[in-house]
Image (cartoon, rainbow, N blue to C red):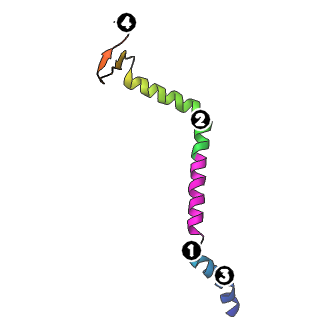
């Protein structure tokens, strides 16, 4: 019985130790951010194409642009 308690004591101490928890959380957040940036870097062209297509769906082939007053007036050939 004494041997078992001697073996479990370090496990209990590790379980109760919270000193390194904040540093571990910071490292985990940085790791998640790094993975997200890596995925964006790898798949940048499809993401850009998708975003451009969605923007064109919303804006369309508009020939309107804001003037100095912030009003939208037609530009180019009418």
Of residue 13 and residue 4, the one placed in the foreground of this image is 13
Quadrant containing the C terminus in the rendered view: top left
Q: Which of marks 3 and 4 is in front?
A: 4
Res 18 label? 1
- Characterize the local packing of mark 1: few (<14), some (14-19) or many (20 or more) Cα atoms within 10 angstroms: few
For marks 1 and 2, the one nearer the N-term is 1
- Does the magenta run of residues contain 36? no
The magenta stretch spans which residues?
20-35
Name the element at disc 3.
Answer: helix
x and y percentages locating residue 15 in the rendered image: 59, 77
Disc nearest the viewer among 1 and 3: 1
- Sequence-wise first label, 3 or 2: 3
Given the current orientation, which residue lies at the most extreme front position? 68
Rounded to the nearest angstrom, the CA distance separating label 1 from label 3 is: 14 Å
Instruction: Identify residue for label 4.
Output: 77
- Which residue in the protein does label 2 denote? 43
Q: Which of marks 3 and 4 is nearer the N terminus?
A: 3
Badge nearest the viewer, 1 or 4: 4
Q: Residues within 10 Å of mark 2 (few under 14, many from 20)?
A: few
Determine the residue positioned at 65% across, 89% down: 5
Helix, strand or loop status at disc 1: loop
User: Residue drawn at (57%, 52%), measured in percent from left and top?
Assistant: 32
Q: Mark 4 falls on what kind of element?
A: loop
Mark 3, residue position: 10
Q: Is residue 55 above or below residue 32?
A: above
**Front one among 51 and 11:** 51
Is 54 placed left or right of 31 in the picture? left
Residue 1 location (% of width, % of height): 67, 93
Mark 3 is surrounded, within 10 Å at the Cα level, by few (under 14), some (14 to 19) or many (20 or more) other residues, namely: few
């Amino acid at each position: 019985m004494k041997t078992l308690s001697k073996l479990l004591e370090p496990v209990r101490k590790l379980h109760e130790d919270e000193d390194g928890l904040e540093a571990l959380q910071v490292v985990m957040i940085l790791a998640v951010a790094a993975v997200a940036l890596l995925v964006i870097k790898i798949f940048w062209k499809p993401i850009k194409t998708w975003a451009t297509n969605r923007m064109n769906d919303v804006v369309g082939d508009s020939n309107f642009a804001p003037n100095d007053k912030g009003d939208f007036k037609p530009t180019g050939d009418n």
